[in-house]
Image (spheres, coloured by chain):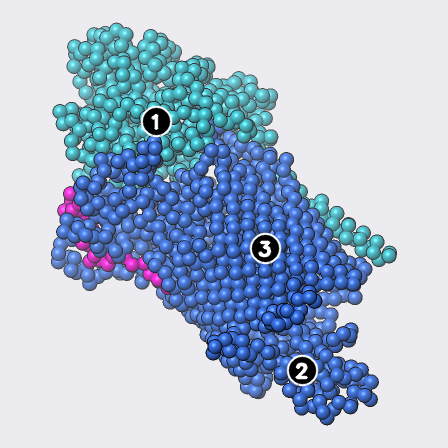
Chain colours: A blue, B cyan
Amino acid sequence: MTKLLLFFGTHKRFQNDFARRYGAVFLFAVFTSLSAFSQQIEIKGKVLEEGTKNSIIGAVIKLKGQKTGTTSDASGNFAIKVKTLPVTFAISAVGFKVQEIDVYEPEPTTIYLSEDQNRLSAVVVVGYGTQKRSELTGSISSIPVSGIKDNAQQNFVNSLQGLASGIQVTQTSGAPGGSSSVRIRGGNSITGGNEPLYVIDGFPVYSTNLSDINPNDIETIDVLKDASATAIYGSRGANGVIVITTKKGSRGKGTVSYDGSVGFQQVSHKIGLLNAKQWGIYKNDALINNGKSPLFSAAQLDSLGKNSTDWQAAALRNAPVRNHQITVSGGSDKTRYSASIGAFLQDGILIGSSFDRYSGRINLDSKVSEKFNFGFNVNGSYSINNNTSSITSLLYIPPTVPVYDNTGKYTFLSPYESAIANPIASADLSTNATNTLRVFSSSFGEYEIIKGLKAKVLLGIDLSDYKQNRYTPSTLYEGSSVSGSASINAGFKRNILNENTLTYTKNINKNNFEILAGFTQQESVTETVGASAKTFTNDIVEYNDLSSGSTLVKPSSNYEKWALKSYLGRVNYNYDQRYFFTASLRADGSSRLGENNRWGYFPSGSVAWQATNESFLKDFSRSIKLNNLKVRLSAGKTGNQEITPYQSEALLTGYSYPTGSGTTTLTGFAPSQIPNPNLKWETTAQYDGGVDIGFFNDRIKLTFDAYYKKTSDLLLAVAVPVTSGYASSVQNIGSVENKGLEFSLNTENIKTKSFSWSSDFNISFNRNKVLSLNDGVTQLLVASEVQTGNVIVVGQPLGSFWGYKTDGIYRDASEIPATPLLANTKVGDVKYVDLGGNADGTPDGKITQAGDQTVIGNAQPKFIFGFTNNFSYKNFDLSVFFQGTYGNKIYSYIIQQLMVPTGYQNVIAGFADHYTSTNTTAQYQRPNELITTNAVSDLYVFDGSFLRLKSLTLGYNLPRKLTKSLKIEKARIYASGSNLLTLTTYPGFDPEVNSYSTNSSRQGVDTGSYPTAKSYNLGLSITF
Amino acid sequence: MKKIIYSLLITTLVTAGFTSCVDLQEDARSNISTGNFYSNQAEAVSAVQSVYNDLSHNTSGDHASIYNRQLVLCVGMMTDDNIPGPRATNPDVRSIAALTQTATNTRVYELWRQHYEAINRANAAIDRIPLITKGDTAVLHQLVLEAKFLRGLYYYNLVRLWGDVPLLIHETTSLDGLKVSRTPKNEVYAQIIKDFTDATNLPKRYTGVDAFRATSGAAHAFLLSVAVTRRDYTEAINQYTLIQNGGYGYKLFDKYADNFNTAKENTEEHIFEAFTIADGTSGSQGNTNILSGFSAPVSKFEVGQGTGTEADAPIVTLRPLFKSNDARTKVTFNDSILISGTTKKKYDPHFYKYWDSSAATNLANNGVNLPIIRYAEVVLFYAEAQNELNGPGDPSVSTSAYAAINRIRNRAGLSNLTAGLTKDQFRDAVFFERKLEFVYEQIRWFDLIRTNGSGSAILVPTLKALTDPSKGGNATNTWTVAKATNVSEKFLLLPIPASEILANPNLTQNPNW
C-alpha cells in the first residue's frame, strides 16, 4: 500500500494547487469586485521553469476561449490586458506541459511550467513537416536528447541505444571516431543497406558515419518506424528514418552559453591470456606433442614468471576526452539565430588512436514579411582521426616477448614461428590519419500564397572532403621488406538536394486537413584518388612526397554518381481530434536500378482513434484517471535502393597482363557483370498496430506496438552458374520477414515540490526470418564469409552461424572416428560431433564438411531493452540508464584465433588447463602444431546477452541566488560515467560488437574490434 | 489572385529549373561499357589481353590464379609432390592434400570459376572482334585466333579435371539461359582441337613486347598434348613432326636452370608461358609470380632472401628421388638456408624453382615466368607416343623413344636410361622422368589422372605406394599416410562445385562425390 501511495498519492498537478493557493485562497475574497469596473485590466506575471526556477522565454500566454494572447520575454515576464475577471490562462511553451490557471485578480502571478517529458503536446518532426504528437497516426519515437548530451560521445548514434523501443544500436568499434550500426525493427535486406535514413534539418543522408555532427547541436531526434511514418520517404524509408533537428534560436534577449566537459576513458574489460610462464609450459607441450624438444628449461620457465609482458596493458591507457562548446542564440520577433563553435578532443584508450573534431554552426531564420520567411543553416566540421590497427597482434604476440630489446629499442618481431610484429612499435611509429572536412548546409524559403497554403523550396548541400595519410616506416617489421611504404587516399563528395513542397492546411468546423504535395531531387557524386609508393631512402618525408619512393605503385581514381527524383503527396485529416487519417504516396526514380524499372511507387495509409476525446467516454475515462487512449493502425510499402551504383549496367573492367618487355603491362578490358535492365526496387510491406495510453494526466504513459514487415524482391547478389563467366549478379530475388512487439512505459513515480522521480522503460522483441532465396537454394555460404561462420539459411534468421558442433575433447582413442575431421587426430584434440553424412541424414561415422555442419547460433537477440530513471531533488538531478540485449550469440573470430593450439602465438588464459598425458581432465585441447587454424565450431559461439549501466549522471543546478550574484542566467555542473558496469559472460573485449556492420549476412561477428571504453566525465554548462 | 498566380509561377519555374539538373541515367564514367567498346583495333587488343589475364591474375580477391598457384592448391596438393607447409592454414587446402575434400571445397570452386571466367572473356573477344570495322583485318583475325587458343587451353584443363563440362562458345549477355548442361567429353575435345587447329594459323614466334602471345607452335604443342592424353599416338607423332619441321627453332636449354631465368624468357625451350614481372605489385591482380614466396621459408630463417610463407612444401618422399648428380636438384630444391652472410643451416628442403635472383631481397617481387608447356615436354610426349606405337627402340637411333628420353636425362647431367626396358617399363620411366623434370610446374596431376598406354591411370597405385618403403615410400609421415589411405578412383575427376549444382540443377555430380 505504501508503494501505491508513493506511486499515485501525489498525482494532482502541484502547479494548480500552487496557483490556486495564490489566486483563489488568499485573494479571492478581497478583490472579487475589481472586475466590475475595469475595462482593461493588465495582468503581469512571470513564467518560470519548475525546479530550476529559470525563466522561460517565449512562453505563449493565451486567454482561454479568446483570441488574445502574448508571449513571455527574456526574463519570463509578460503582461496581458483582459476585459473581465476571472479569466483562465493557458500557458504553453515548447517542451513544457500546458498549464491552465484561473486568475481572479490583477495581481502579479508566477506560473511554473514543468518539463513535458512525455512530449505528447510537443511537435514531432515527420517527413516534410511537423505534427503534434497527439495527432500522429504512425509509430514514432522521440529520443530524449538530454540523455545523450552528458556523455561526451563524439557520435550521437552511439548514444541512441536503449533510449527508444524498436531500435537496436550496436557499436561497430570502440575506436575514437568509430561508428555504430542501427537496425530499426530488424534487418530487412541482405545485400542492400540496412541502416536507417538520417534526415538532418530536412536533408536526407544515408551514411553510417555521423561523427561529423556535434551532438550538442541537436535539438530533437525523432525515429520514424512504421510504414505510415516512413512511406513519405518511400524510396529509402524501409529501414526506418531518424529525423534530426538542430538547435534554433528563440525570441528574446540573446544568451551566450558554454558547455564543457573533461573526462577520461579506460578499457572496460581485457581479454584473459596466458602469462609468460604459462605460455612457456604450453609452448613446450606443443613442441613435445610434435616430436620436438622443449624450448624452455625448468629454470627458464621460472625466470619467465618474472618477465611476463602484458601487451594489453602496454597498449592501453587512461585516455582523456575534452569537449568545449560556446553557443550564442537569441532573436527578435522576426529573426532568430543560434550559432555555436565546438571542439571535441578524444584520445583513444589504445595508444596511437585519437579523434579530434572542431565544429561550427549557424542557424538563422527570419520572417521577412507576413507571407515570406526563410531559414538558413550551415554546419561545418573538421576532424582528425588517428587509427591504430594493431589490436589483433597485441593479443597474438606471446607474453615472453619483451616490448623493448636489450638495447632499449623496440623488439622487432616475435621470434617464434608466426611473424608477429611488435604492436606497440606499430602503434607508435606508423601513421594512419584521416582528415575530414565536412560542410553541411540547408536553407529554405517559404511563402504563404493564400491563407493556409504555403510553398516551400529547400536547397541543401552536403560537401565532404577527406584525405587519408598512411606511412609504415622501414624500422617496423611491416615496412622493413619494402623499405617503408606510404599511401594517400583522398576523396571529394558532393550531395545536392532540392525539395519543393506545397502545404495546405484548412480547418472547417471540426474537419482538419493538411495536404502536402511535393517534388524532390537529390544527386550525389563521389570522386576518389589514391596513390602509394614504397622503398624510401629514409623515414623523413613519409607520405608527404610519394615521388621520393623508388617503387611507385599504380595510382587509382574513381567517380561514382547516383541520382534520385521523387514526387510525393500526403493528406492528414482529422475529425474533431477524434478520428485521424493519413494517406501518402510517393513515386521514386533511382539511377541505381535497371533502366526498365527505375520508378517505384510507395503508398501508405493509417488511421487512429483518440478515444479519450469521445464525449461518451469522458466520464468513464475521468473515473479511471485515463487521459489518453489512442489506437493506431497503419499499412504501407517502402523501398530500398541501397546498392552501389551501376549494378544493372553492362560494364567492363580493366584486367592487365604483362607484355614481353619484362617491365610493362598492357591493360585488357573484359565485361565484369551481367547487365540486368530489369533490376527494381526492394520493397518492404509493413503493418503496424499500436496503442498509446496515458493515465493520471500522463503520469503513467504506455505505448504498445505490434508490427509485421515483409521485404520482397531483395536486392540480392545471387550466385549465378559460374559457367556464365560470372559468380553473381544483383537481382530481385528472395524475401525476409520481421515481426515484433514494442513496449514502452514512462512514469512519473514521485512528483513533489522538491523531489521527483520518473522512469522510462522500453523493450522490443523482433523475430527475423529468411523466407526465400533464389530457386531451390536453401542456404547461402559466401566463400569469404565461411571463416567467420556466416550463413544465410531459408527458414532461419539472418545472422545465423554455420559450423560443427563439439563435445569437449577426445579423452579416449576409442572415441575417435575412423575418419575424423582432421588427419592425425589424437586423444586431447577437439571432439566434433557426427551429425549426419549418410543419404538419409544418419551419422556416417565420418566427420565431414558436407555431413556434419549445422546452424550453431544466431546473432539476433530475443529482446533488447532500456531502462532510465531520472531523479531530482531540489537543485540536484540524477539519471541512471541501464540497457541490454538478451539471447543473441556472438561468433568470436578473435577467440577462435586465440584458441589456435600451435604454440606459435598466445592463447586465452583457459589454455593453462590444456590436455597432456598427465592432465587428462583438462578443459582445453592439447597443443598441436598441425592445427594452424581452427574449424568453425560452436566452441567460438558465445552468449552475447548483457546488462549494462550505460550511463549515470549526477547534476547540480546552481541556485538562482548564487547565479544572480555571478551575473549569469543559469549554471549546471554534472558528473557522468558511461559503460560503468557490464554484466556479461562474453570473454572478448565487449559483447556489443558487430565487426561487419554493413553486411547483414555477417552479423554478430567479433574479429577483434577496438575495445570499448568506460568513461568518466565532469561537465559544466553556463548560460549568460 | 494575382499573387497566387505569381507564386505558383515562381514555384513552377524553380521546380522546372531544378528538374533539368538531375538525370536518372547512370553516369558510370569510371567504367567502360560494352556499348562504347569493341569498336577499333586497340580495343580488340585490349579485349584479348583480358583473356591472358586469367592465366596469372584473379578477380575474385582470392590471391591464387590458375597458373599462379590455383592449380597448386586445387590439384597439385593432391599429387605425390606437394603438401601444405606449416603456414598453409587454409583447411580447404589441407583437406585437398589429405584427399578428404568435398564438393564444397572453395579451391575447387575457384579453379572452376576462373576457367569459365576466362572462357567468357575469350567468347566475348571471339564474338565481338569480327564485328570491328576499324583496324587491320589481319591483326584483328590474329587476335581472334589468340582468343581461340586460350579458350582451347582453358577447356583442355576443364575437360581433363572434370570430364564432361558445359561447353559454352558465346559470351553471356543476359541472365536468361544460364542453366546449362554438361556436354559429353568428346564434343568438348572436338571444340578444343578445332580451336587449337585454328590457332595453328598464328605467327611462329614473337619478340619484344608481343613475346607473351600464343603462337602456332604453342597450338601444335597443345594438339600434341591433347593427342597423347587421348591416346591418339599417331596424331601425336604427326604433331611432333610439324613442330620439328615447322621452323620454330625450339630446343632444350643447355642448362636446365635457364628455364627459370628471367633473361631467357620466351627463347629456345619455352613454348607457352604465363608471364609475370617483378613490378612490386602483389595480391590477386598483381603481376608477380607468387609461387616463390609461398614455397620459401619465412625471412627470419633466411638472411637476404626476403619473406616467404612456407605454404607449399615438397612431400617427404620427393626430394630423395633426385640423384645428387642431377642438375635439376639444385634448381628444384634448396636444402639449406643462409642464416648469416656465409653460415648455412640445414633446413627442410623447399621448392626453389622460381627464386628470382634479380629480386632476391624481396620474394614477393618475382618476375620468373610460369611455364605452361616447354619443349622438354614435347620431347617426352614424343618418347611416350613413340614407345606406345613402336616400343622403346634403339637408343642409338635418333628418332627412337630412348633417344628422346635420353636428351632430357643428359641435359640434366644423368647417364642414358638403362637399355633394354620393355614397353611397359619404358612407359613408367617416361612418367618418372616427367615427374622429376616438371616438379611444381602443374603437370604431375594431369599425368596421374590420364589414362596412359597401359589402359589405366597411375593415380591410385602411385599414391598408395607413398607408404610403401620398398618403393621409396614413408609409412609414418602424416601426409603420405593420408594420401595413401584416402586415394580412390573417384579422384580421377574433381567434384563439380556444390554451389554450382545449387545454382544450376541441370548439372550432375561426378561419381562418388
Please give the name of the residue rendered at 33% of the width and 8% of the height, measured from the top-left corner: B234
Q: CA distance from mark 2 to mark 3?
A: 43 Å
Q: Earlier in the sequence, mark 2 or mark 3?
A: 2
Q: Judge by depth and name the residue closer to the eye, A890 or A787.
A: A890
Residue A307 vertical position relative to residue B383 in the rendered view, above or below:
below
Give residue A46's mark.
2
Q: Which chain does tag 2 point to?
A: A
* Residue ID for mark 1: B494
Give the SS element for disc 3.
strand
The residue mark sitting in front, 2 or 3, is 3
Q: Judge by depth and name the residue closer to the eye, A817 or A635.
A: A635
* Residue ID for mark 3: A689
The amino acid marked with disc number 1 is Leu
Whether residue A155 is visible here, answered yes or no, is no
Give the SS element for disc 2.
strand
Residue A124 horizontal side relative to residue A194, left or right:
right
Residue A950 horizontal side relative to residue A423, left or right:
right
Image quarter of residue B105 = top left
